[in-house]
Amino acid sequence: MDFTHFDEQGNARMVDVSEKDVTRRVAQAEGTIAVSAEVMEAITSHTVKKGDVLTVAQVAGIAATKRTADLIPMCHPLALNNSEVTFEVNEEKGEIRATCRTVTDGKTGVEMEALTGVSTALLTIYDMCKAIDKRMVIRDIHLVAKSGGRSGDFRF
C-alpha cells in the first residue's frame, strides 16, 4: 500500500496537486455541544460575562477555516471563496449544533476547513461558558457532505 503523505524513503510530504484540475469544491461539517440548563440560559439570554457566545464562536469558526493549513500539517493552504458557521439551538435537549460550510475553486477539497471551523466554534462555546459549568460535552463532529474533485460527491 502506498501512503500519499510519505515519499519512497518514508519522509513526510504534502501531496502534489499540480496536475489536478481546478473545480468548485464545497464541504459541510457539523458537531454538537451538550450544555446544562444554566449554560443554555446564559447563552440564550446573552448574560455570559465574556460576551455574545454564539457570535464570538461564529467568528472563531470562520477564522479557523482560514487557518486550517497552519494547524493540520499536510493540508494545503486554500483561498476560500466562502466560509459560513451557523448554529441550531435546541433548548429542550440542551444542545447547540454548529454547522460549517466552506467553498473554494481549487485543486484540493475543503473538508478539513469545514471540520476545523466546526471544532473551533464548539471549543469557543466551551471556553466562553466553562466558568458556568465545565461538564459540557462536544460530540459527533463529522463531515456531512462534500462535492467537487476527483472523488466526486459524498453525503453522510
Image (tube, rainbow, N blue to C red):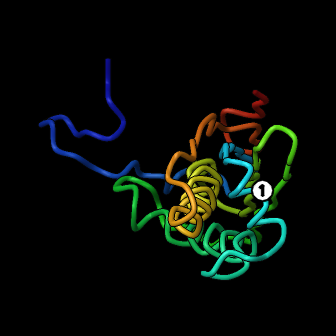
Q: Amino acid at mark 1?
A: Arg
The residue at 71%/63% (across/down) is 104
Task: Give the total of numbered labels.
Answer: 1
Q: From the viewer's side, name the closer residue of 52 and 98.
A: 52
Q: Which of the image's four quarters has the N terminus?
A: top left
Vertical relation: 155 (above or below) 147: above
Vertical relation: 71 (above or below) 9: below
Dot 1 corresponds to which residue? 24
Q: Which of the image's four quarters has the C terminus?
A: top right
Image position, residue 143 (x, y; %):
67, 38
Vertical relation: 144 (above or below) 37: above
Q: From the viewer's side, name the closer residue of 5 and 50.
A: 50
Q: Circle 1 sits in a helix, a strand or a loop, which is it?
A: strand
Vertical relation: 90 (above or below) 48: above
Kindly indicate the quadrant of the structure image that contains residue 95: top right
The residue at 32%/30% (across/down) is 3
Circle 1 crowding by C-alpha within 10 Å: few under 14, some 14–19, many from 20: some
Q: Is residue 146 left or right of residue 20?
A: right
| Furthest residue toward top | 1
The residue at 57%/70% (across/down) is 128
Q: From the viewer's side, name the closer residue of 119 and 154.
A: 119
Q: From the viewer's side, name the closer residue of 124 and 40.
A: 40
Image position, residue 116 (x, y; %):
56, 56
Q: Is residue 125 left or right of residue 69?
A: right
The residue at 74%/77% (across/down) is 47
